[in-house]
Structures are given as structure tokens and as C-alpha cells.
Image: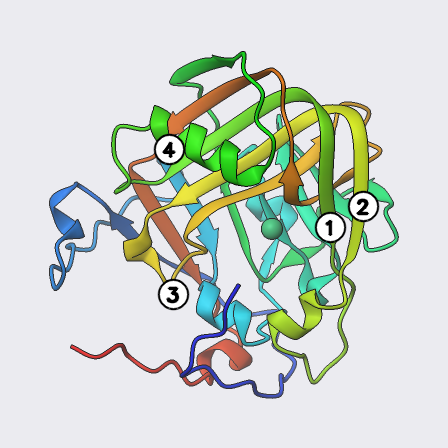
Amino acid sequence: MSMPAHARPFSSTPFGKNVRQKSLLIVFLGLFTLAGCVPPPVTIAPSAKNDSAITQVSIYSGFQTGLYDGDVTYAQLAQMGNFGLGTFNSLDGEMVALDGKFYQAKIDGSVQVVDPQMKTPFADVHFFHSQQQVQLNESLQNYDQLKAYLTKQLPSANRPYAFKITATFPTLKIRSVGKQNQPYPLLQDAVAQQTVFELQNITGTLVGYSMPDYLSGVSPTGYHFHFISADQQHAGHMLDCSLNAAMIEIDYLETVTLLIPQNAPFQEANFVPLPK
Ligand SMILES: [Zn+2]
């Protein structure tokens, strides 16, 4: 994760409980990928279920600068998806959601079911529907080889995808991050204090997304996976893995919903527009 040059850290202030969460819905319809084209906003009632829609809490470039307190509770997030990844207020560990269950992987290696009243400063969730299944029957030695293999399965780089990869991993390297204190450090500095766990012959599921490059600044672009073991004893952000076999399920996504934080730290942050 690299720091955008224009981003500046700032100190956070508490936000009230009555802050409102507004959503900005952006529908990607292929042609909007051309530079300079702005998609028309499309309003969808929150109750309208769009199974190809991913909901993202906050803006990644803001999160990278230390916006680690969000407004959205996990009870609310569970209404927007049963699958996904993210983190917790104060950057208190890694979140992975699978089959409607949300887990918190803490920096000490413990994994626990998320309290619905906890809040997230950044998350991606959606309702997973497998639209393409690929049985992997070849050896992949590392994450780069997995990325290359996945990219070969995809018809285009210009849409978001979700992936559910179930396997016994000969090797798996995951990490978690620790709860931060204000004033919050940059994400790159907080991640530098991560704890890495190296597992062998571990059975479980990678939960992840790939986001197109044109969402740079808004979302983490490229592949992003979190892991949860079948026994729910190990979880975290995936750094590397090897595979000999796997069931890979892919979900094609069409809509990205952004939940813009209404709290003061986000609203007072200095987002600099990109050159036109
Ligand atoms: Zn992650």
C-alpha cells in the first residue's frame, strides 16, 4: 500500500452518535471506464437488493491517511452483505466475513465473532453468488502465481470481482494489525507494526475482491484477500500462499456503493483532486 503524495495525516475528533450515513451509488456500465466520463448517479432504495453490488465503507485514500474511526456498525454492515473484508475502529484487527458470519482477527492471533455493535472505518461487503467455478488442479507457488492464474480466468480487468477460494494451503502467510491510538499514524506506519503468522497445511477460505485500476484512490485496486480457517481459529489479511488444488468461485460485480463517512475527521480531511 503506497501513500498518495497529496495525502496528509491529521488528528481525529470524536463524532456524535447522530451522524448520518449517506450513500453515494455509482453504477459501472462499461463505457464509464473512459477517462473523463462521469457516471450519472443512480439512486437505489437501501432495501432494494442488488446481488451484483458491492458496498464499500469509506474511501481508501482517506483510510490510508489514518481515518480509522467509522460510523457504520457491523449490525448495519451485515444488512449489506454476507461476504467481505475490512477492519475495525482504531484499526483493531482484520475482518473477514463468510456465509454471513463476521470475524475479527486480532494482532495476537486470536479470532472472535464480531460484536454487532462494533464499527468499521473501512470494509467491502456484498452478497456472494458464485457465477463461475474453476477447479484448480495445478501447483501455484506463491501469491503472484495465484494472481496471474485468476487474471487468466477473467474476461476483463475493468470490473470488480469477488472470489471465494476454498483449499488446503501447503503454506499460507497472513497478518493482522494492532489497535491504534490517536493521533492515528498513517496506514503504512501502522502496518509496519503488523504481526505475521505463517501456517502450513491449513484448510480454509480466502475471501477477496479485485478492483479495477480506475478506482484508484477510492478502493484498494488489484487483488485483496482475507483468510478464515475452516475451524475459525486462524484469520487475517493474506500476504502469500501456495496451492496444489482449490475450488475457486468467482462473482461478477456491477455496482459499487460508497458509504461516505459523515463524521468530522472525514468531513474535514483534505482530499486533493487529481489533475484534470
Ligand atoms: Zn486486508
Q: Mark 1 points at which residue?
A: 175
Query: Residue 271: horizontal and vertical position, in percent?
Result: 38, 80
Of mark 2 and mark 3, the one earlier in the sequence is 2
Residue drawn at 54 percent across, 76 percent down: 65
Give the residue number, with chain letter if any, for mark 3. 217
Q: Which of 189 and 245 is in front in this view?
A: 245
Residue identifier under label 2: 197
First-in-chain label (4 vs 3): 4
Which label number is shown at residue 105? none
- Marks 1 and 2, how far apart at CA: 6 Å
Helix, strand or loop at label 3? It is loop
- The residue that mark 4 highlights is 151
Q: Do the residues bearing badges 1 and 2 touch, measured as CB atoms within 8 Å?
A: yes
Which amino acid type is shown beneath numbered disc 1?
Arg
Callout 2 environment at 10 Å: few (<14), some (14 to 19), or many (20+)?
Answer: some
Circle 4 crowding by C-alpha within 10 Å: few under 14, some 14–19, many from 20 = some
Q: Nearer the viewer, mark 2 or mark 3?
A: 2
Quadrant in which the C terminus is drawn: bottom left
Left or right: residue 160 versus residue 7 is left
Residue, x 82% and y 24% (percent of image)? 231
Please tell me which of labels 1 and 3 falls first in the chain.
Answer: 1
User: Are circles 2 and 4 on residues that touch, CB within 8 Å?
Assistant: no
Q: Residue at x 49, y 30 (%)?
A: 163
- Disc 2: residue Cβ within 8 A of ligand 1's nearest atom: no
Give the Cα distance between marks 1 and 4. 24 Å
Q: Distance between the residues labelled 1 and 3?
A: 23 Å
Q: Where is residue 256 in the image (x, y as percent from the top left)?
A: 34, 47
Whether residue 19 can be seen here: no
Q: Distance between the residues labelled 2 and 4?
A: 27 Å
Q: Residues within 10 Å of mark 1 (few under 14, many from 20)?
A: many
Of helix, strand and loop, which one carries label 2?
strand
